Structure formats: structure tokens, C-alpha cells
Image (spheres, rainbow, N blue to C red):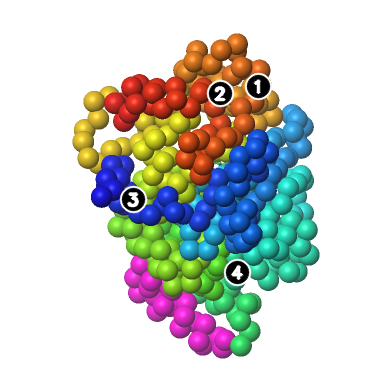
């Protein structure tokens, strides 16, 4: 029997080891690791992001917000992306949806959805996909809702723009149903109100209703539950799971809340300074994490099963500037394990993201794997 996940908000781990989402295999394959992904076996994953870079030229220099990110998500699977503020999570999701177009952002790499390259897709075709095949729950609900139109009108529009055969009346009925499903009381009245008449939490729910309106095959949820109380949080997570079960959707959940990841995700991608630093099935990353930054994140997470002996430790120090990323391992100025790496490699050499003994679990750290495992067992685990 698998142990129940001890972190707040977590579910009992399921068959995530058999997950169809995969680790950063471009890094893995470039360093000789075997590609065990469906793509590597001949089947293309539903979403495949390869060597994605998103850089912003600014007066102070080039901001490397996303710097060589590779991952994939299959239908019916959920990938959790975690990392501190500014690590590039939202910029990544905006790149997938093509939301950097027309801005000064410089993009390279590849984003393929169901085999189709999105980065060079004409805007008109991308617009067709956005809101129907792929949808996003934004971190900031106001950015997704127009202040001058009623909430209902906006959801009706979101439905009809992709389904012109649906009448206004039918779309409005569906909107009321959606509002009820996301826990908005009295949807018959609320449907005709404006976003400013909704509280922050209600707006968040209305935006989730809009994102789910067309049963998207790819749903990206960027901090979907931050503004919500725990009961509504649970409802929203249930809704996303229902969507996945009903339509086999691929889901990316971006969050600071590792409990949400434990509850929802099959696989976890830990981002630091625009790069993946650890990735793998949720059970591996939660029970046998191997990157010191992940250790720090887990140490700052509340536990349900017992009172911690030590206080919650946020990762000491601050994330680096993405204009002047430290040389070597970007985490090195904050890392207390550098002494385990000889010859100062931590400050001179960028570690590759490499597979561990579990080929689907990839880690970016110069410490030898056996040593990392020992350090986790002796230094980190007792403090969690
Ligand atoms: N248009 C832009 N121009 C310049 N820098 C940008 C731009 N958009 C984002 N950035 C920078 O890119 C980095 C990554 O931002 P992003 O919004 O992806 O972080 P995040 O991981 O989503 O953080 P949070 O958890 O706070 O939402 C940040 O340093 C941010 O300042
Ligand atoms: S490579 Fe060095 S600095 Fe980076 S996480 Fe590993 S030990 Fe720490
Ligand atoms: Mg963000």
C-alpha cells in the first residue's frame, strides 16, 4: 500500500509512477539518457515544449525569464509547476498560449500541441485554439474579465465565438450552469452582473467558469485557488478533475502550494531562475527529492500528520536577478550543500538536468546521486 501524502491538502499518491507526463528529456537525451517518453517510443505527447526560451530585452539588460525549458504533458495527465515568485512559471504558460505575441518578448524553441507547432502558427489559427482547445485560468482574474461587460455576457461570448451554432439563449443557460458549478450562489442573478460587483474570490470562480466553458483539451491553471477559501478551493480542484475525467484533458497547474500539487499532479516540475531544476513523478519528488532547492521548498510546507519539530523554513536568501543570473548553478549563492561538490564546480559549471536511478526523475545538481540520497535521509527528511 502506498503511504498517504503527509503534506497539507494532499491526496493519497496514486499511480503517478506510471504517469504519461515526462521529465525534461531534451536535457536528458542531450546527455545520453534514454528517451522513454511516448515520443521516444514513437507516439507524440499531446503538449510538447522543447528548449523554450523567453527573453525580454530591457534597459537594464536581457531578462532570461525562461531559459531552455523542455517538458511534455499527455492527455489525462496533470503536471504541477512549482517554484518561487519570478522563476518563470507564468511566462512559460503565456508562451504556450501565444500571449507574448506583439510584445518585445523574444521566443525560441518549440511548443507543439497535438503535433502542431504553435510558435509560428498564424494568429488567427491560434485564436481559434485559445479558449476552446486550450484555456487558461489566470493568476489575476481582472486580466481575464473586461470591466465593461457583464460576467454572463463574457462567458456567453466565450462559448459562441467557438460555437456559432449555439443560440444566445442556450449559451446563457450553459453559463448559469457553469457559474453554479464553480460555486457562485444565485447564478440567475449573478449572470447579469459586472465583474466589479463580484468579490475577488467570485471573480476568480467566474474566470474558472469561462476557462472551462468549452471543455478545453489543455487547461493551464496559474495559481487557480490563491484567492479562494479552502472549501471553494476543493470544489475548484474537483471541477478540474471532473473535466479531466470527462474529456481526458491535459492540465498544467502552476502554484506555490505544494499541497495542491500533491493533490492534483502526476508529475512535478520545479523551476528555478527560468530552468527546470528537478522533475519527476509526484511521489519521487515529494518522497525522495534530490535537489537542495526542492528540499528548501518542501521544508517550507505545512505538514498534516504531525507537529513539526522545527519551524517552517522558507528557502533562505532571495531568487537571483534574471538579468544577472549567477554563474554555475543559479542556486549556488543560497545553497548550503556546495561543500559536497569539489573544485567549486557549483560556481563555475551549470549542472545539466540528468536522470537519476529512476529514469523519469531528473535532477540538476553536481552532488553525486548516492550522496544526495544520503543527505536527504540524514539532513533533510528528519526536519520535514
Ligand atoms: N514583460 C516583461 N518584461 C520584462 N520582464 C518580465 C516581463 N514579464 C515577466 N518578466 C520577468 O520574468 C520573470 C518571471 O516572471 P513570471 O511572471 O513568469 O514569474 P512567476 O514564476 O509566475 O512568479 P509568481 O509566482 O510571482 O507568479 C520575472 O523576473 C519577471 O519580472
Ligand atoms: S549544484 Fe551545487 S549549488 Fe547547485 S544545488 Fe547542487 S550543490 Fe547546490
Ligand atoms: Mg506567476
Q: Is mark 2 within 8 Å of ligand 2?
A: yes
Give neighbour class at mark 3: few <14, some 14-19, many 20+ (Cα, 10 Å).
some
* Secondary structure predominantly adopted by residues drawn in magenta: helix
Residue at the disc numbered 1: 349
Marked residue nearer the N-terminal end (4 or 1) = 4
Residue 63 horizontal/vertical position (percent): 70, 35
| Separation (CA) of disc 2 from disc 4 | 40 Å
| Separation (CA) of disc 2 from disc 1 | 9 Å
The residue stretch that appears in magenta:
166-192
Marked residue nearer the N-terminal end (2 or 1) = 1
Instruction: Residue at 34% x, 50% y: name it.
Output: 13
| Separation (CA) of disc 3 from disc 2 | 29 Å
Residue nearest the viewer, comparing 380 with 55: 380
Above or below residue 339? Residue 306 is below
Residue at the disc numbered 3: 13
Residue at the disc numbered 2: 366
Q: Describe residue 308's horizontal placement relative to residue 147 as left or right.
A: left
In front: label 4 or label 3 = 3
Q: Secondary structure at mark 1?
A: loop
Q: Is residue 179 magenta?
A: yes
Residue 372 horizontal/vertical position (percent): 44, 25
Q: Quadrant of residue 31?
A: top right
Amino acid at each position: 500500500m502506498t503511504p498517504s501524502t503527509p503534506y497539507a491538502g494532499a491526496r493519497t499518491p496514486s499511480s503517478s509512477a506510471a504517469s504519461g507526463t515526462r521529465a525534461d528529456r531534451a536535457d536528458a537525451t542531450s546527455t545520453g539518457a534514454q528517451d522513454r517518453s511516448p515520443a521516444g517510443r514513437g507516439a507524440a505527447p499531446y503538449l510538447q515544449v522543447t528548449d523554450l526560451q523567453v527573453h525580454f530585452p530591457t534597459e537594464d539588460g536581457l531578462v532570461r525569464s525562461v531559459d531552455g525549458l523542455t517538458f511534455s504533458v499527455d492527455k489525462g495527465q496533470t503536471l504541477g509547476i512549482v517554484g518561487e515568485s519570478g522563476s518563470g512559471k507564468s511566462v512559460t504558460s503565456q508562451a504556450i498560449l501565444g500571449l507574448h505575441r506583439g510584445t518585445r518578448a523574444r521566443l525560441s524553441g518549440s511548443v507543439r500541441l497535438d503535433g502542431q507547432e504553435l510558435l509560428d502558427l498564424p494568429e488567427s489559427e491560434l485564436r481559434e485554439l485559445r479558449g476552446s482547445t486550450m484555456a487558461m485560468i489566470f493568476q489575476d482574474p481582472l486580466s481575464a474579465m473586461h470591466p465593461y461587460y457583464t460576467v454572463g455576457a463574457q462567458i456567453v461570448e466565450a462559448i459562441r465565438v467557438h460555437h456559432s451554432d449555439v443560440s444566445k439563449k442556450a449559451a446563457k443557460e450553459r453559463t448559469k450552469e457553469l457559474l453554479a458549478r464553480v460555486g457562485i450562489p444565485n447564478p440567475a442573478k449573478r449572470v447579469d452582473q459586472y465583474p466589479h460587483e463580484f468579490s475577488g474570490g467570485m471573480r476568480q470562480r467566474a474566470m474558472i467558469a469561462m476557462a472551462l466553458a468549452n471543455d478545453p483539451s489543455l487547461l493551464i491553471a496559474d495559481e487557480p485557488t490563491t484567492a479562494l477559501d479552502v472549501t471553494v478551493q476543493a470544489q475548484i480542484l474537483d471541477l478540474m478533475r471532473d473535466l479531466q475525467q470527462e474529456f481526458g484533458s491535459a492540465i498544467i497547474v502552476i502554484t506555490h502550494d505544494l499541497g495542491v500539487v500533491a493533490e492534483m499532479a502526476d508529475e512535478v516540475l520545479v523551476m528555478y531562475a527560468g530552468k527546470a531544476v528537478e522533475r519527476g513523478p509526484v511521489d519521487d519528488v515529494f518522497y525522495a527529492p534530490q535537489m537542495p532547492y526542492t528540499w528548501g521548498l518542501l521544508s517550507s510546507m505545512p505538514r498534516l500528520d504531525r507537529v513539526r519539530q522545527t519551524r517552517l523554513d522558507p528557502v533562505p536568501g532571495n531568487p537571483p536577478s534574471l538579468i544577472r543570473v549567477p554563474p554555475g548553478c543559479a542556486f549556488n549563492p543560497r545553497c548550503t550543500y556546495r561543500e559536497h561538490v569539489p573544485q567549486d564546480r557549483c560556481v563555475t559549471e551549470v549542472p545539466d538536468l540528468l536522470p537519476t536511478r529512476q529514469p523519469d526523475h531528473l535532477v540538476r545538481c553536481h552532488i553525486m546521486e548516492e550522496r544526495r540520497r544520503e543527505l536527504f535521509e540524514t539532513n533533510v527528511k528528519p526536519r520535514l
